[in-house]
Each structure stands twice: as structure tokens, then as C-alpha cells.
Amino acid sequence: MRNHPWQGAMKPFRVLGNTWFVGLAQASTHIIDTGAGLIMLDSGYQESLYYVLYAMNECGLDIHDLKYIIHSHGHIDHAAATKALVELTGAETFMGEGDREIVNGTRPELNWADDYDMKFNGIFEPDHLLKDGDRITLGNVVIDCVATPGHTAGTFSFFWDIEEEGKIYRAGTMGGAGLNSMQSAYIRKHGLEKENWRGAFRKSIARCREEKVDVFIGNHTGHCQTVERCERLFAGDKYAFVDPEAWGKFLDQCERNINKLEMTDPL
Ligand SMILES: [Zn+2]
């Protein structure tokens, strides 16, 4: 079914401290203001880039301050706007090594565009290929990069500190939790049988449990109830996204989902 990302336009907002939401209901885009330039987490669909630019402007974030674009993975809803943004700003791009071929045009069948009846027009060669344990530093922000394959081979999760009113909160993303790419039909169609993405996903869930996360930043709004929390935020609850239990609950749900998939759709 064709996806119309602009139909999911949301009012942009500051999540907490240095971190902003400037994305859409279908695909989250976040900005981290480092004091020495902006970092974008996931660029989103090319078709809705105009809305991300509008949202940044609404938040007082100057697109020309964009220095880095970091990707959770290479699917169309996270990386298709990157090329246009690079042409606009000269920002450097970061992608898990395992997803390089998805976005540089070598394996376009894995970018999920066909499945949404869309086109991934902005193929690009990432400037930096992430490895597990890499750290990305800009200004006063350090982002810890953790390989969490499963949803794709090169899915990465990111962790950084947010300061608010003198207190430090740990922010974290889970780079890919969708089981769409782990269904047996998809695996057979693309010849991914040997890659054991389901097993990798289980290990990634366990790895994520080692991280303490106070502010769970979903790369889809469903991960951390972005819509409900931002309503609370707009109603005056400044700490609506601070919820040290949300991370663990989400990982529990991921585990239930993969268990269910193994039962209902064995390989
Ligand atoms: Zn994806």
C-alpha cells in the first residue's frame, strides 16, 4: 500500500534539553543541538523533507547548522531524504556498515521502497561506516553507537546525554524493531536465509537491555508513545519523555514479538 508520509505531519517539539522531534507520524526525525552544530537522527522520506525543514524552522533550528546525519538503518523511511540534505548543507553522513549497500544502490531491493510502492531516489555513499562501539562527537555531545542488527544487517542504536535543569538524562534509541524484514516470505524472497536476522535481533534485544535509558527516543512514534507524550508535553508536563521504565517495556514487547513470529511463521 502506498505510504503518504505528509499525511502524518506532526507539530514539532523539544523532547528535552538538546533533543528535538522534527519528524512525522510515519517516521521520526530528531535533531540534537550540540552547541557546535546540529546532528540529525534519520532523515526520513524524501517526499516529506519539506516538512522536516519547516519543522526545524519552527523550532528555531537553522538547517545550515546541520553537520552530521546519522542513520538507524538504510530503509526508505529513515534515509531517503539524506542525499537532498547533503546537497543543501554539506552534512557528513553515518551509516552502519551492513546497510551501505542498501543506500548506495548496490542492493536497492532491500530499501523497502517497492513494499510501500514508492521510489528511493536519493541513493548515496555514506561518508562514515559505523562499527559497534564507535563514538560520534560534536560540540558537547557524544553519541555511543551500538550495532543492533536484525531489522537490517546494519541497524544501529544510539545513546547520548541530555542535560535539563542541571540534571543529566540518558537518551537512547532502538534502531530497528520491525519484524517485516524477518518474515519468512521476505527472507526467502531476498535470499537472506544464511544471515539469521532473527537470531541477531534476539542478541540485539539482550544488548540493549545492558543500557540504562531515561529518555527513550523512538525512531517510529509507536516505540515510545511519541504522540501521547507530546500531548502531555504541550499540556505543560516538561518531563513527559522521562520514563526510565519505557525502554525495558519496549524491549519486552520486542521479545514477545519475535517469540510470536517464531511460532506463527517458522523458517
Ligand atoms: Zn526499517
Image: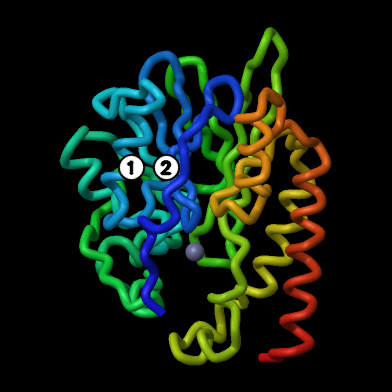
The residue depicted at 66 percent of the width and 74 percent of the height is 198
50 left or right, relative to 167: left
Q: How crowded is mark 1: few (under 14 residues within 10 Å), some or many (20 or more)?
A: many
User: What residue sits right under mark 2 in the picture?
Assistant: 70
Q: In which quarter of the image is the C terminus?
A: bottom right
Mark 2 near mark 1, Cβ–Cβ under 8 Å?
A: yes
User: What residue sits right under mark 1 in the picture?
Assistant: 93
Q: Is residue 70 above or below residue 253?
A: above
Q: Quadrant of the N terminus?
A: bottom left
The residue depicted at 58 percent of the width and 30 percent of the height is 15
Q: Is residue 125 above or below residue 65?
A: below
166 left or right, relative to 61: right
Q: Which amino acid does label 1 sit on?
A: Thr
Q: Residue furthest top?
A: 166
Q: Which amino acid does label 2 sit on?
A: Ile
Q: In this view, does 107 lie above or below 130?
A: below
> Would you identify the image quadrant in which residue 211 lies?
top right
Tally of numbered discs: 2
Which label's residue is closer to the chain start, 2 or 1? Answer: 2
State the CA–CA distance, disc 2 to disc 1: 6 Å
- Residue 202 in the image, given as x and y percentages of width and height: 73, 66
The residue depicted at 50 percent of the width and 83 percent of the height is 192
State the SS at label 1: strand
Give me the disc on residue 123.
Answer: none
